Image: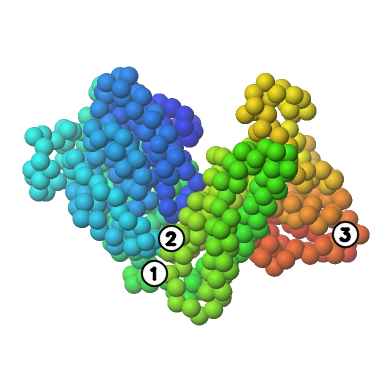
Amino acid sequence: MNQLIQVKSRTWTHIPGTLAVDIYPVIHKPCFMCSSTFVLRTPKEIIIIDPGGDRMETERTGQLVSNIAKEKGLPVFIFLTHCHIDHILSMPVLTDREPGWKIVCHELTARILEEKNEALTMANMVDIMLPDIKVTALFFEESHGSRGIAAHPLVLTRSRVRVDGHKWVDCQSFPIGDGDVMEVIHTPGHSPDSVIYRVGYFLFTGDLHCATSPGAAGLQGWDNRKLALSAEAVREIGRREKIQLVIPSHGFPFSFEQAERIFMTVRRDALRFLDIALLNRARADYMAEYARVLLEEASTTFSIIAGRLLKTSYYLEMLEEKETAWEIMKAIDIEGIDRVTDQFFTFLRELKGEAQVSIISKAVQFTRDVEKIFEPEKIHYLFDGFLLHRLRNLFIDFVNAAYGMRFQNQETVFDMNRSIRELWASLKSDRRASGSIFESLESDEEYKRELARRIAYVPLFSTLELDARLPEEPSVVHADEAVFQDAVSSLLEQFAISGTDVVSLWSVTGDEKVQLKIAVGKREAEITLRHSKHAYLEHAVRMAGGSFRLTEEDGTRCYIFELGLADAA
């Protein structure tokens, strides 16, 4: 069995099965409003697949591609897997900068984008104005000559793939680089225009892996029978071409062995969803509760960040560093905070009540307002990284919950004991170097930043002692490590804020599960988590692939995080 090739975000990797094609993936946290982007580099061209990242990410990727293209004199093509807004919204960031870059996509994709079809792109669900997009050339073109170009920039050859013994899916192939070939396969179902791409032993599958998720299943253009056939086609192509790595547009790449299981589940679910409703009562109730919990947790984090900015600005002004204080205050809009807070509580009331509002639209608008108020690149030096990281992830998770999206295969294999030790070291670390204030005296700008950093610093965990009884041997689990660490740090923060002196922590390994147990001393055992915090931890750890619960052990409250062992996954 071939060893699985690993690809790392923002790192060049050679694609096996090709002579000279390299991939530069930009893998985004799974999110409804943006997709991952993939750059392919050959000796003769550069190809960008799905420019759906946020604006800053796309600008950074565009600069990278532009530098290479100009240095090597290479043409640049932009390919799309389908028309949904999360895959195309940032495309003008590239094409406005480099109008010579050519957009090539399925003929249906071109029609939908150029006609600004708000329903099929899903722009109408989030009140987003579609950008002007002009497609250069088409895959699977029926209306020849409609692009107004003398010749297609790619040399296309048509073929078909047999599926289920008697059904067919359309395919086109074209040469890239020096002797390599790329394939595009029409795989409708998630949307009528969906395609996948094959290069060497890599398969780029767009959103097919989550096409039966609540919130994705039932969207306009969704077709369960076509989706079932497309999922089967992925398996047939994967086996025929000896695919090693499947690369979705949301989430981490996974092995073809995993892909077979995922796409057979998609196929089975698609055939079951004969008359699916976009939103039923059970999903609405769950979504409302989940959204409320996430928003309340995010609001708490939001308040901590806002309060620290105000405190830092106040003391800087007292020290007559008014310009620096003003720059910090510009990173946050005071009136905007009040407005967003009012919107937040109004939104919660509407979730709990009977008001008929667009939950999705309000969710996205709320996150946008927060992004306008906070400019992380201006204030990141004032905070421990986990605060801004968690705030970002909370809002991403909220939007995913509002849309009802779930992203498969986000779990990784890691040593839970090591992960906890590293997390605690990070939480306890003082990011202020002892002599840095003196070293910064040579630069007025650096001195002001260091002064602001020291004023903003809050040693939240300085008085909290951790009695960690973790075995030296690893406890290798299968879960989402980032979400797991967010949940554990959130619980430890709650203890620190409550004035807890000592927290005991130990792990217990069973046949299939590992339990991380956290308890406080008997004197402090009456500390009670508020309902929304407990609910947040339950939801977060469930998303990580485990479970969270509160129990009593020897008369002491014990908080248990349970994750599955990697060997049992």
Closer to the camera: disc 1 or disc 2? 1
Query: Residue at point 33% right, 62% down?
Result: 124
Disc 3 or 1, which lies upstream in sequence?
1
Query: Residue at point 56% right, 46% down?
Result: 330
Q: Is residue 91 left or right of residue 376?
A: left
- Asked if marks 3 and 1 touch (Cβ < 8 Å), the reply is no
Query: Residue at point 88% right, 64% down?
Result: 555
- Residue 433, percent from left and from top: 74, 29
Disc 2 or 3, which lies upstream in sequence?
2
The number of callouts visible is 3
Report how far apart the C-alphas of labels 3 and 1 lie in the structure: 47 Å
| Secondary structure state at the residue bearing disc 1 | loop
Q: Is residue 180 left or right of residue 481?
A: left
| Kind of residue at disc 2 | Ser
Disc 1 or 2, which lies upstream in sequence?
2
Q: Is residue 146 above or below residue 437?
A: below
Q: Is residue 54 left or right of residue 508?
A: left
Number of the label disc, if any, that sits on residue 213 = 2
Disc 3 packing (10 Å; few <14; some 14–19; many ≥20): some
- Asked if marks 1 and 2 touch (Cβ < 8 Å), the reply is no
Residue that protrudes farthest toward the bottom in the picture: 354
Closer to the camera: disc 2 or disc 3? 3
Disc 1 packing (10 Å; few <14; some 14–19; many ≥20): some
Number of the label disc, if any, that sits on residue 524 = 3
Number of the label disc, if any, that sits on residue 278 = 1
- Residue 146, percent from left and from top: 10, 46
| Secondary structure state at the residue bearing disc 2 | loop
- Asked if marks 2 and 3 touch (Cβ < 8 Å), the reply is no
| Kind of residue at disc 1 | Leu
Could one spot residue 400 in this view of the protein? no
- Residue 141, percent from left and from top: 14, 46
